[in-house]
Amino acid sequence: MSNAEGTRVVAQSDGAGRADAEQIPDTERPPGVEQIPDAERPPGVERAPGSERAPAAETAGSGRSSAPERVVDAEKDGAEKDGAEQLPERARTGAWKIPGAEKVPGAGDSGARTAPGAEKAEAGQDTEAEKAPGGTPEPAAPASADPADLTAQTAPMDAVVATAPAARVVATAPVDPVVTTTPVDPAELELTRPRGLPGLFWKDLAQVDFGPRRFRLGPARERLETVSQSFLTGFNAVIAGETGRIDDIHEELRGFAYEGAGMACTTLDVLTITGGRRLRDLLSGQGMRYPHMIHMGAGWAYARLHMRPMWGIRSVHPLLRWLAFDGFGFHQGFFATDRTVGRQRSAGLMDRTRRAIFDQGLGRMLWFHECAGVDDVILRIAEFPPGRRADLWSGVGLAATYTGGASAAELERLSVAAAEDGFRAHLVQGSAFACASRLISGIVPEHTVAATPALCGVEVDEAGGWTDTALIALGHNAHSGDHYQIWRAGIRKAWARRNRDS
């Protein structure tokens, strides 16, 4: 479900944005020069030793905008003088330029502002200092003493460089280096475990180790354990109040992290009786591209709380909410393996529709239980009664396409086995569901691209389109479990019609 990411340039300046900057009286300012008394000098700006007159800038009309003018007190030659020392002619043009104080993109109100007249300079025109007949520049009008402008002009100053024969004040707007977010593995994402009651919900990533769980071990073990760690990392991110950190995880793993986030939000909603507020906020906000996975995660929460998903989940998507029973089935298979897989028991208090979706989630779990071993998955499904195999095949197709772990040749063998069992259409339906989920997230990994032709006989876009076609056929009022089953059947019909036409 993205979901990598962006580059930020942050321009910071010490003291910028302070609203209490005071206006400098014009009577205390030499013509064309802004004088800053010692009492009003911004913090961090020191008086340069020796001469304190700012140097002449480049001539006006050079094609570049000048930075805000800053001049410290005029130097004194040992004698009392009234007013500031006469400045060079170029200073009287108002074209003083301080290196490094150009306007910083993205600095907002806190960054350095372009001095008045800079718009003309950028267009290659003369600045506001117009040349008089004979080539002698006329004195520039005093700069605006608006407090906000003055604050922006004097704030981004962090160094004073003295040079002979005059001191040059070098103003630079401190710019942080370009920050690029590098996707990380879930185990490397550092989250702060909360204290108190929320900390009791914290999940240890080691609990998804396939060894202690007595799952089959194979070549895909590392990948599948990483997927499981992503799930728990998403859960912990919500508990820690750092849901935004989920997007730091690798793109193709984010869907699993949002599944865990769905579990966390639902758990907190049920325990705090919020009516599903956190889950709705996640679905309509940061996790809006992962609705399938989040609803599956909600089913995990109800399973952990020993409840049935429909008790309190009516306020979310009217049709996708049935995927909570998929997550419920996955959870039961993962944590109660002996009972659910070994003895082939399902949860009670469920009607036929709910049990069918439960088995789809159990089929997804079998892909993990058998460590993506195609031959082992085929043998495991064969152990179940024929009446449950169709939905198990559907879950296997979903996991094989969305999660990966098997080669295209192995998946073709899986497709042949499903056809021999009479449930090829159900395998295709689960695979198409995975394609739709990946397309909505905007992230279609290579293993999904390779798996879809092997299982569905078409590319990802076409398989995902079958789910849209079947959903549109249901109309706008689809909400019940029967509607959800009709949706699944519509996907199978779309695949059958496509094969018949071809």
Image (cartoon, rainbow, N blue to C red):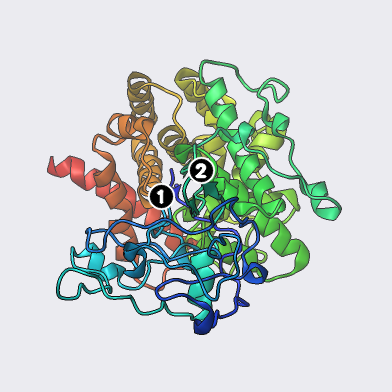
Disc with the residue nearer the chain's start (2 vs 1): 2
Give the CA separation, mark 2 to mark 1.
9 Å
Q: Is residue 126 left or right of residue 296?
A: left
In the image, residue 259 lies at what x, y percent?
A: 57, 48
**Amino acid at dot 2:** Arg
- Of residues 428 and 10, the one nearer the viewer is 10
Q: Are marks 2 and 1 in contact (CB under 8 Å)?
A: yes
In the image, residue 423 lies at what x, y percent?
A: 38, 36
- Neighbour tally class for label 1: few under 14, some 14-19, many 20 plus, Cα within 10 Å: many
- Of residues 252 and 7, the one nearer the viewer is 7
- Of residues 255 and 216, the one nearer the viewer is 255
Label 2 belongs to which residue?
254
Residue located 46% across and 62% down the image = 112
Residue located 59% across and 35% down the image = 186
Q: Secondary structure at mark 2?
A: helix
Label 1 belongs to which residue?
441
Residue located 65% across and 52% down the image = 242
Q: Is residue 110 above or below residue 420?
A: below
In the image, residue 217 lies at what x, y percent?
A: 59, 17
Q: Quadrant of residue 45?
A: bottom right
Q: Is residue 161 left or right of residue 301?
A: left
Q: Secondary structure at mark 1?
A: helix
**Amino acid at dot 1:** Ser
Q: Is residue 97 left or right of residue 457?
A: right
Instruction: Report whether residue 355 is seen.
Output: no
Q: How many marks?
A: 2
Q: Is residue 282 above or below residue 8?
A: below
Q: Quadrant of residue 324?
A: bottom right
